[in-house]
Image (cartoon, rainbow, N blue to C red):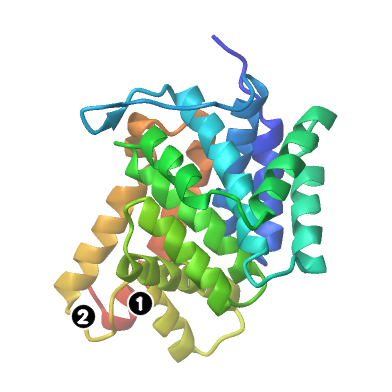
Amino acid sequence: MDKVNWTGKLIGAVLGFLLSKGSFTGAAVGFFIGHLIDGYRSGGLNRGSRRLGGFSTATAAERQRVFFESLFLAMGHLAKADGRVSEEEIRIARGIMHQWQLRPEEVQAAIELFSRGKQPDFPLDTQMQKLASACRGQPELTRTFLEILMEIPLGKGQIDAAERDVLWRIAGNLGVGRVEMAQLEALLRAQRSFGQQAAASSAAAELEQAYKALDIEPTATDKEVKTAYRRLMNQHHPDKLVAKGLPDSMLEVAKEKTREIRAAYERIRDHRGIK
């Protein structure tokens, strides 16, 4: 049995948790990137992928390498979206490389990818289509990629117009529309806020965030509340995610995500007296 490398995963989880100001969603995203870094260490960057009948023939390791390559390229492009890369964005990028304790050659590869992504003539559409091809048939990876990119500007407090245009362009290449992106952004914001504000917010504000964390309106019926809860729990159920390809090493992160969802549901359930 291969030995599991925990270094990148654990460092990524801690970094994601800190950069997202205590969000377990951020921790999960960081943990996943750390997993990709560990996968990258085992084989370097992918140079292409193939399609077959609408599904990629790329192996999991190949998908990880394309994901890694595309992520740092897209991060660079997103950082330069407004015409300049801010000191804060440089600090975040350097912090990621430092906290993951990348080897010198890995740091150099990440820097080169980030720098390539910043160039005005960088072929963003081509790269994102390459990622779409590698992840074809694996929609959870596409969603994770978009969540990671969206967490970067959200971590600064907001997504400006130029950044949003880039995110929309990336999403379009990955087959995700603007409505779905808006829903994803709202859900990420709500999940970040629910955990961070629970102790300091009023009961009404906490309840409002709980509804948003389940992606439903306060006017939803009890049946709709239960349905939303079960849908999210089904999507994030650790055993089911592992069966779909989630590494066993990420099992605890998946469990933490279900605890977040359960906490939001229990807040609503207790308020409504749902049995």
**Residue 122: % across, % down:** 60, 50
Does the CB distance between marks 1 and 2 fall below 8 Å? Answer: yes
Residue ranking furthest to the front: 121
Regarding mark 1 in the picture, which secondary structure is present there? helix
Question: On the image, numbered disc 1 is attached to which residue?
Answer: 211
Instruction: Indicate the amino acid at tag 2.
Output: Ala
Q: Is residue 168 left or right of residue 23?
A: left
Q: Quadrant for residue 37, please give it.
A: top right
Picture layout, residue 1 above or below residue 184: above
Residue at x 48% of width, y 27% of height = 48
Q: Which mark is residue 108?
A: none
Mark 1: few, some, or many residues within 10 Å (few <14, many ≥20)? many
Residue at the location (76% across, 43% down)?
111
Residue 110's image quarter?
Answer: top right
Based on the displayed image, in which of its 4 quarters is residue 154 positioned? bottom right
- Which of the image's four quarters has the N terminus? top right
How far across and down, in percent of the image, does residue 109 sit?
A: 73, 35
On the image, numbered disc 2 is attached to which residue?
220
- Marks 1/2: CA–CA distance: 9 Å
Q: Nearer the viewer, residue 116 or 228?
A: 116
Disc 2 packing (10 Å; few <14; some 14–19; many ≥20) = few
Q: Residue at x 80, y 51 (%)?
A: 94
Identified by mark 1, the residue type is Tyr
Left or right: where does residue 226 sit relative to residue 270?
A: left
Would residue 198 be seen by someone viewing this image from the given angle? no
Residue 139 percent across, percent down from the top left: 33, 44
Give the secondary structure at mark 2. loop
Whether 265 is drawn above or below 157: the answer is above
In the visual, does 178 lie left or right of 256? left
